[in-house]
Structure formats: C-alpha cells, structure tokens
Image (cartoon, rainbow, N blue to C red):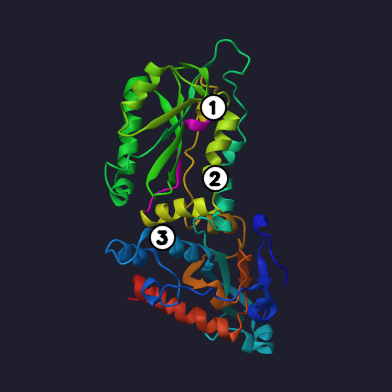
Amino acid sequence: MSIAKPDTLNTILIGTKDPLTEQQQLIPPEPESLFGDEFRNEYGSIRNCFVRSHYFTDQIVLEDVVDLFREWKDDSEYFILRSVYSIHQETFKRDASSYLGNVGIINNYITDYKYKFIKASKRGNDVYRYLVNKKLNPLSELSNVTFFKDDWGVKQTSLLFVTLTYDTNRCDVNTAWANIGDEYHLFINNLRKQYGHIEVFRTWESTKGYYPHVHALIGFKDNSFHVHVHTDKNKKRSFRIPTNDKNKISTYWHSHIDVQGVNNTEDAIDELTKYITKDLCSNKGNKTNSMIWLFRKQSYSVSKGFVGLIKGQFAEVMESAKVEDVKSGDLIKDLMSNCNRDVEKWEFVGILRGVQLGFSSCMWSIDIKKPPPRVVDLLINEHNRWNALHGGFN
C-alpha cells in the first residue's frame, strides 16, 4: 500500500489487510487532553456545538476555546461514502469470507459495497489549506496591475488596503464578533453610496485581546486617489491618500481605520492572502481561526466582480465568479468528479475518526473493497447511528 501525497489527491487502495497493522507506526497516539467528555461526541471528537454551549454559559474562557479548537483541528476525521459493485458468483465463492454479509445476487453476479474514506476539511488543517489555495488560485494567477512606482512624481491608485480595527471600549468581545459582519457590510454599503462601483477582497483577524478586525482590499472602478509617501518614527514607509479622503472614508466606521494606497495588485493580494493561508499554522492563526470557528464566521470573502475588475485593469468589469470560503464537501467534489463512472450512486454512511479507522493523518482518500472485520463493525455501527440521528430510517 502506498501513501498519497496530500497535494496530489491520489487515492489509496486498501485490500484485505487491516490498515492499522500496516500504518500504525505512522499514526501518533491520541493526544492527552485537559478537556472532558462534555465537549465530545460518542467517538471522543470535539464538537463546536458543545464548545459554544459551555463558552456562552461562562463555563470556559477564550483561552480554553483556542485549545479546544487546536485539538479539534488536529483530530483527523473522515467522511465515509459507499457504493454497490458487482462480482461474479464464482469469484465470490472462492473468497466469500472477505465480503460483507449484506450482499445480493443479480444475473449470477454478487453485489456488495465498496467504500471511500475522504479526510474532512477542518479550518487550519492540511486539507483546508489545500482547498483555500485552490479557491484563491484565480487571484494568484492575475496579471499584475501597476498603479504607480516609487520614482513617479505623481502617484495615483484605484486600490486601497483598509484595516478596520475595533474600539474595545464599545462593547465586549462577544458583542464585537456578533456585530462585526453587519457593521462591515454597512461600511461597504456606505462606500458604494459615496464612490459608486467597488469590489472587495476581505478577511477577518483576531487581536491579542480576541477582538475582531478587518483587512480589506477595496477596488474603486470609477475613482482614484492621489498618493504620497509617509515615513513613520520607525522609518517604515507606506503610501497614504490625502487626509480629507481618509477622513471621509473613516466617517463610515465607528473605530480607528488605517488606509493605505496600493502601488500594485500582486503585492497587495499576496499580503492579504497570507492572513488566510500562511498564518494558519501559527499561534496567531490559531487564535484567529478559533474565534472564526466559535462565532461561526466565514474566514474570507471575495466579491463577484473583484477578479474581473483587476483583469479589466479597472477600465471595465469583466465577467467573474465569486470566490467563496471552503465548504465541508469541497474535497469530496474534487475526488469524486472523475472517478468510478461505472457507479451510479454513492451513499453517505457517516463520519469516523482516523484513530478509530487506523488511518495516518497524511492519508486523504482511501478506497476499500474488502474492509477488515474491525472496520466493518465500525461502518455498520456508524451507518445505523447516523441514520438514527438524521432521520434516515422510516
């Protein structure tokens, strides 16, 4: 059996041997945890709904939420799909013990199930990073648009890098995260009323004190701003727009706002993208993503016309698709798009942990035609449990 490299999305084919036996040296032991069963489902996995329940009833604090998020993120879980496949009766008779008991006979062929296990995307894990990079690929492939260079006498830009901070005296952390979405949309709507057509690439970030703030690239189709070079007391240079323009934009936000003029699209997009991708595997990234997880926010958004605006170099808006945050089924769609065309239907069985199945966390997609008895029992129990919980049985 071979291990699939995460970025290739290869499928691992497993025969009759128990995956745990072959891979146990690659599977780390279940980590010790300071948190009890009240945060877990029947299989011992952390669940967001239990964390939220305990947090919003003041039984845990935000530092606990970060630790619970990290444990949840690092706990590999697998979506399980099954489909029917056929083998001739003679083949079945030779190795009948290898097949599940729930088989049928159609025109001298035995029908049985084959299974596909697909690692779940969890905000911040390796699958999530792959999917985010794929989603944001249209941005990275854009041709660079230069608005001005350092040695130009007159500098103008139609793209601003805006950071909206949050005044901690306004409200507590919970209220800030609850309101940040509506307040941000009000800010953007007011900009549209003032400046006309704009397109936006936005992401959240958590401060050290857990308050939200917003980073956004805002492209103005019909407006441009004069830019001057500003050097702060630490000798750091930045490009600033005139004070009257900055003050006008600031009136639409309730707290401090930082506005910088963008000299080229490539560097600006890379700078904003790093908040979503490069910072995922860090303490800062864990804090941000745990807050997004707790308060159920989308980590980023790209408006429908943002890519088209840059492709058209702000002269005209070209057709463009909205770049959306990662969905739970995105990897399933990737893996199922061109495989097993002879199979008419895949059925969802449930979700199991990698430590239960014996899968190393580096395994993203596994096909099994003849599961070992231990895995068969897990599959049957999970199928019954899932259907009972979600109304699958009449």
Residue 246: x percent and y percent? 39, 22
Query: How far apart in space, not on screen, are marks 3 and 1 (Cα)?
Result: 40 Å
Q: Nearer the viewer, residue 203 or 229?
A: 229
Give the residue type at disc 1: Ile
Mark 3: secondary structure: helix
Q: Could you say whether the residue bearing mark 1 is in a helix, strand or loop? A: helix
Disc 3 + disc 1, Cβ < 8 Å = no
The residue that mark 3 highlights is 63
Residue 310: numbered disc = 1
| Label 2 SS | helix
Magenta stretch: includes residue 299: yes
Estimate the x, y position of residue 391 in percent, counting from the top left: 34, 72
Residue 215 tag number: none
Tell me the kind of residue under disc 2: Lys
How crowded is the residue under tag 3: few (<14 C-alpha within 10 Å), some, or many (20+)? few
**Residue found farthest to the front:** 233
Which numbered tag is attached to residue 135? 2
Front residue of 74/58: it is: 58
Q: Quadrant of the C terminus?
A: bottom left
